[in-house]
Structure formats: structure tokens, C-alpha cells
Amino acid sequence: MTRGMSAGMDKIQAIRDFVAKAIHSIDVPIFNLPMDCISSADRTLRDGYGNSTDIAVLLYTMLKAVGFKPEFVLASPINYEGRFIVPIRAYPNPVWFSVVLVRVRTSKGYVYLNDTDQYAPLGSTPSDGHLGLDLARGDIFEIKALSPELRDSEDVRINITLRDNGDVIMKKTRKTYGMDFALFKKRFSEITPEDRKRHLQELVSSISKGARPIGRYITNYYVYPGIEEFSVSIKGYAVREGGYMYLELPGMVKRFAGLERGSRYNPVYRSWRVKRHIVVSVKLPTCLGAVEIKPPASLEIKVKHAGTVKFFSTVTKGEERLLLVREDIDLRPFFVLPSEYPKIAESLRQITRLGSRVLLAKVKQASLDAHRCYLGGGRTIHGLYTCIEGPGLAE
């Protein structure tokens, strides 16, 4: 299997992928069976199935056979948070550490195995940021992906070309990292053509009911990070009313799960990490004058014990004006006491309020004169009156 391979990472990946494909995993937690029920590596390989502990023994044996020095560690579903370590040490319980992993030291750091399959980039792990227990030393530590680029995250770029009449052409590009890439690769390498077409329809309609796909739908999982890209055209996406044009910016975060209420009686624990980078660019038509977006040009919110949320917007000058809006979300799993909750929830609501996603622009007078409508040539959208092409007289 590893014959002819000189690089250590290639050998590790060959063994990881072989075991993931050849051995069917049975979901039986480590402490639900006596230790003497753990199968040998030969038996697991011969039977073609085993629980997490059996597969860990097989991985350990194969890695050791090709010259590595693997180690067993236990992983916890609980995230590495200082306030959790004290009670875990004070009240030890087998349920705190229920996943068996095998780690191998490389020149770049530790690679964790037995929680990923052939779709995941080597060095990523769903246990990233979780508590780990070193069985040889008895130490509690933080499990980390091999590098920051292998942690779960998502980059989204939305390019919008806005027309004078409110029509838009929109292209959305999404890049996935870490276990997000693993899910993306697994889904699109196994998807049927019919399900792929249906998925595109769902993506398009999630932007607007009036959106129509144009161009190719790209799903490239042969590169890292994975790339998903599609384009749509939407008539009347921006709303004109009087001397103004309104455009709701897509892709911006609309809510933070678990933080919707104004107050709480019990603590809140968000057990997942969110790392997302969103950039929306809008090519502005010549008919627009002054442009405003809320919140202001720069806003940074620091969430206690968790991380930051940043918002930035600017309009480039010149003949071809471009509005750029960037939103960076980097929130670790966090635990919030009731006394801390109102301040944190209110600060995050500054980002999620509708005003943070709306572009308001003043239409130049010459363009207003060219777009006046009479005799039924208008319609109402969200309570606002706007001009459309159709029957009626226009000056």
C-alpha cells in the first residue's frame, strides 16, 4: 500500500483512506463494551467492520508497521473552554471522553485519525477545538487541526451588477475548508444529476423567487479549498421609490442561533465554531448619486469568551463605482451566563438588524425624469412604488 512512497503524509493518507473504504464503522461507544471485547487489528481487517476502538487499533498497527510512532488519545464532544476543565477534573466520568483517536506527529504538527474519511483533507478533524486526553500522560489538552487552513471555515464572494431599472446580475462563489470541504466533496462526488439540478434550483430560489440561473453551475472538489459557483439574473431586485433606490444585500448573516431572546434565566452554550468571511461587491449604475449603508463604514463587535464579528463597507471612486461590503465572523464555541447574556445578544443584533443589509442610494434627477411612469406602468413591492417596463406612457 505504501510501497514507493517517500513522503510521510502520503503514507498516512494512504492508510487512512484504505481503512475508511475497507472497514465499516459500527457506532458503539468505547465504554459500552468491556475492554477485553476490543478486536485485534487482524480480525477487524478480516471481518471488514468494527467499532471506533477496533478501527483505532487497526490504524495504530498499520502506522507502526510503516515506521511511525502513533499514540492513542481520547476526544471529548466538549469544547476546550477554561471554565469546563475544572469541573471535568473534579468530577471525572467516562462520558467526558468517548471518542478514540490515533495521532501521529509530523514535521508540521499532529495529524489526528479515526474521525475522518477519504473525503477530508489530511490534517483536518471534527474534534478541532475540543478537549483531548493524552492516555500516556493523563494530560487534558486542546485538539487542533494541523494548520489554520484546515479548520472549518467558509469564504463567500457575491458580485452584483446593478442596472438603472433595478435588475441585477449576481454571481456567488463559495469556498469551503476543513470538514466543510469534506462534506462538500462527499456530497457532490456521490450526487445524482437529478439531485444536483434540484440543489441548484434551491440555491437560486433562496436568493429570490424571481431569480433565474445563467451560465454554468461549478462544483470543483478536485482543488482545495472546494469551490461552488453559480450566477443568476433577477428582474426588479432593487426597489425604486421616488428619488431613491433600495437594495437588500444577500449573504449577510441574519441571525445567531441561541441568541435571539432578549434575556435568559439559564446559561447559553453554543457548541460549534463559526468562521465565515463574506464579501459583497455591487457595481453601481451611473444613475445613482449618494450611497449610504448601515451600519457605518466600520464596526467591530468583540464577544466575551468567543471572538469577534467585523463589518466594513466602502465605495470606490472613479468612473466605475463599486460598493464593497465585508463581514468577518470568527466565533469560537462559548458559554454565556444569564448576567452576561443581554449585553452580548444586543451587540450581535447590531449586525443582524435589517438596516445592516440594506443599500440606500439617491437617484440623480436626470435618471428620475427618464423613468417616470404613467397609466398603470408601476407596481408595489414591499409597500414601495416602483416603475417597470410594460403598458403605459413614459416621458
Image (cartoon, grey):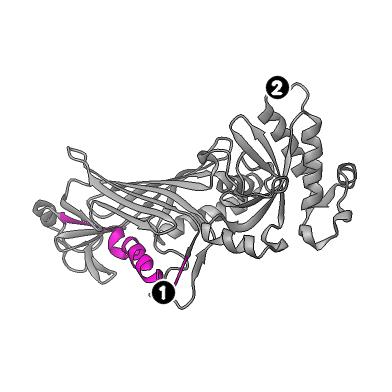
Q: In which image quadrant can residue 261 be found?
A: bottom left
Q: In this view, does 354 lie to the left or right of 208?
A: left
Q: In this view, does 34 lie to the left or right of 277?
A: right
Q: Which residue is drawn at 23% across and 51% down?
A: 297
Amino acid marked by disc 1: Arg
* Residue 368 position in % (x across, y down): 13, 56
Q: Which residue is drawn at 69% across and 35% down?
A: 13
* Residue 135 position in % (x across, y down): 72, 48
- Mark 2, residue position: 6
Badge 1: residue crowd in 10 Å (few <14, some 14–19, many ≥20): few
Q: Which of 315 and 352 is in front in this view?
A: 352
* Residue 142 position in % (x across, y down): 58, 49
Badge 2: residue crowd in 10 Å (few <14, some 14–19, many ≥20): few
Q: Which residue is drawn at 40% across and 68% down?
A: 340
Numbered disc total: 2
Q: Do the residues labelled 1 and 2 touch (CB within 8 Å)?
A: no
- Mark 1, residue position: 261
Amino acid marked by disc 2: Ser
Whether residue 221 is visible, yes or no, is: yes
Whether residue 28 is visible, yes or no, is: no
Quadrant in which the N terminus is drawn: top right
Is residue 256 highlighted in magenta? Answer: no
In this picture, is 223 found above or below 161?
above
Quadrant in which the C terminus is drawn: bottom left
> Which mark identifies residue 9?
none
Is residue 344 highlighted in magenta? Answer: yes
Q: Which of 144 and 386 is in front in this view?
A: 144
Q: Which residue is drawn at 17% across and 63% down?
A: 373
Q: Which is nearer the N-term, disc 1 or disc 2? A: 2
Residue most extreme to the bottom: 265
Stretch of the chain drawn in magenta: 336-362
Q: Which of 171 and 77 is in front in this view?
A: 77
